[in-house]
Image (cartoon, rainbow, N blue to C red):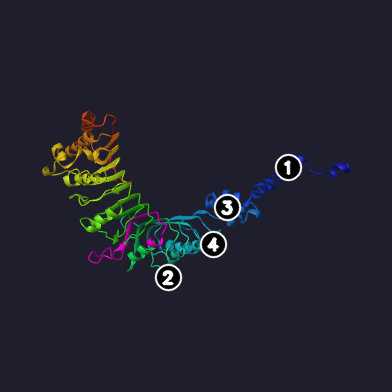
Amino acid sequence: MASSGSSSPSPKRRRVGEAPAAGTDKLLSLPTEILDIILARIPFKHLVRTCCLSRAWRRRWESVPFLDIELSPGSSARVLWRCAAPVHGFRTVADVRRRNIYRAARWLRALARKRVRELTLQFKPSSEISRPNRLLGPALFSCTALVRLHLENCNMPPAPQGFSGFPKLVWLTLDNITLPFKGGGAQLERLIAAATRLAVLELPAVFTSATSDPGDIETWAIRAPNLRELFIIMPSAEDNGCRFAEELPLLEKAYIVIDCLLGTQDFLDAFRRIATVNKLGFVSLYQSNNNLEGITWKFENLRDAHLNTNFGKQSSVLSVVSLLKFAPDIEHLYIMADDTEWLEEDKIDEDSLNTEISGDLFARLKYVSLIGGVKYFSNQMCFMKFLLSKARSLQIFAVTFVYDDERKEWYVKACRELMECQKASPQVVFIPKLSYKPQQTAGL
């Protein structure tokens, strides 16, 4: 019949044909702000692929601000030029190869134009002990909107004339970074000082041109009045010239390794400048002397202390005492014990500890943890028993013994002695553990 030949498609067939368009329209009909939030949460490599959904989606991702971008090492900078500004974050991990450094320079030029806020460039070193030998491009200094900067295993170039720093920077991490030119330390000092909002500074490995010449160290200072957290490592042979020239009045947390300054006024100045901290990590590879003996000021806010101690040296044990003397309110004490033998004249006993240590020093301790090279050594056992007999407020006493042979008799004996020894605190709980290898650090 004629009427049947001109009839419209069935409702069911029409719904099937229109379903994709209706679904797409529903998503695109969301308010722009809401859709941007949704799209910004999609991993960048998947977000870019939304251009294949339909003609309406072809360039939609390019208008999404505040993207978090993670690129593979071989990615072109062209995709960054298509992003909307500002870019919230950019991160990549690449091998230290010439072509990757050149590619990073192109990334930086694009990211500077996109006002990137958080930038992480991590280059894998050719070996675990190698110094960086690839120079970043100067476009780094055009990223003036940076709030967080993390550079790893590369060389920082000289800043261009007139560079005023990163005024919005809150977090700076430089790990295995070299400033291979005269005035590198001074440049870093200016960069830190210009970041008036800087709250976190991490310098686990920074090298300047003067580092290799111990007779002519180019000193520079940390000037950061709003700093809250500091992490710095300067081994004995790597004095990069960093000094603590001013108070850090708002500092709350510090982890420092400054063996290159041991025995100097600069060493004591460093501790004086960080006296406001409530968490302190101090590690030294040289423990022949009481490294903290010269402290004469109070750490009024210090509650958590992380130290390493060689129980084979009385002087090293007394460095713990020196800290406790001037930090009367420490509640949590973490000690990394070195696994070393000692001479007979360095043997300690309860009488010698009573002579050097007032029992009141342990009065406020609530939590004590010993890790690393803890074994059934007489000095270690003597110190632990002494502490248990003096710490009246102690709640947790945790010890991780290192297990390096097939016999466990000494471990059982050590636990029994610590369980049965005199304790000043009736509520203390002893928690023994057994590790199959020494733990490496007592980090915060």
Give the left or right position of residue 327, taking residue 149 as reference: left
> The residue under label 2 is which amino acid type?
Gly
Res. 27 visible in picture: yes
Residue at which label 3 appears: 49
Quadrant where the N terminus sits is top right
Q: Give the amino acid type for the residue marked by disc 3 in the picture.
A: Arg
Which is more foreground, mark 1 or mark 4? 4
Magenta region: 192-220
Q: Amino acid at mark 4?
A: Trp
The answer to whether mark 1 and mark 2 are in CB contact below 8 A is: no
Residue drawn at x 46%, y 65% is 142
Residue under numbered circle 2: 162
At label 4, counting other C-alpha atoms closer than 10 Å, the crowd grade (few under 14, some 14-19, many 20 or more) is some
Tell me which amino acid carries mark 1: Arg
Secondary structure at numbered mark 3: helix
Q: CA distance from mark 3 to mark 1?
A: 27 Å
Q: Residue 176: which quarter of the image?
A: bottom left
The residue closer to the viewer here, 245 or 110, is 245
The count of marks equals: 4
Q: Secondary structure at mark 1?
A: helix
Identify the element where label 4 is drawn.
helix
* Tag shown at residue 178: none
Q: Is residue 423 magenta?
A: no
Q: Earlier in the sequence, mark 4 or mark 2?
A: 4
Q: Is residue 11 left or right of residue 68?
A: right
Q: Nearer the viewer, mark 1 or mark 2?
A: 2
To which quarter of the image does residue 388 belong? top left
The residue singled out by tag 1 in the image is: 15
| Residue pointed to by mark 4 | 81
Residue 346 in percent (x, y) is at 13, 44
